[in-house]
Amino acid sequence: MNLPLFLNEVDVLASELSHEELSGFIHEMARTLPEGRREHFLSTLKSFGERGALQK
């Protein structure tokens, strides 16, 4: 699947989930990450949180 199609599908599915469901999904993704990718995951998550705070 090409990237635009994939991202569109992700957006559609995410829009149908509640906050709790999205939070659970993020937790599950984090739980299954290999150790070598955890720092990158945390820094990416943190940067999204900071961007959201700046936009408010």
Image (cartoon, rainbow, N blue to C red):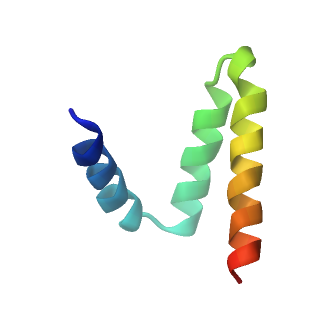
Q: Using residue 39 as the reference point, say whether residue 25 is left or right of it.
A: left
Q: How many marks?
A: 0
Question: Could you say which quadrant of the image residue 31 lies in?
Answer: top right
Seen at 23% across and 35% down, the residue is 2
Seen at 73% across and 16% down, the residue is 36
Depicted 36 relative to depicted 17: above or below: above
Nearer to me, 20 or 9: 9
Q: Using residue 3 as the reference point, say whether residue 23 is left or right of it.
A: right
Q: Using residue 17 as the reference point, say whether residue 32 is left or right of it.
A: right
Q: Position of residue 6 (x, y in %)?
A: 28, 43
Question: Could you say which quadrant of the image residue 43 lies in?
Answer: top right
- Farthest residue to the bottom: give it: 56
Nearer to me, 16 or 40: 40
Seen at 72% across and 31% down, the residue is 40
Looking at the rendering, in which quadrant would you find the C terminus?
bottom right
Seen at 43% across and 63% down, the residue is 17
Q: Position of residue 42 (x, y in %)?
A: 76, 40
Depicted 14 relative to depicted 41: above or below: below
Question: Could you say which quadrant of the image residue 44 lies in?
Answer: top right
Looking at the rendering, in which quadrant would you find the N terminus?
top left
Q: Position of residue 39 (x, y in %)?
A: 78, 29
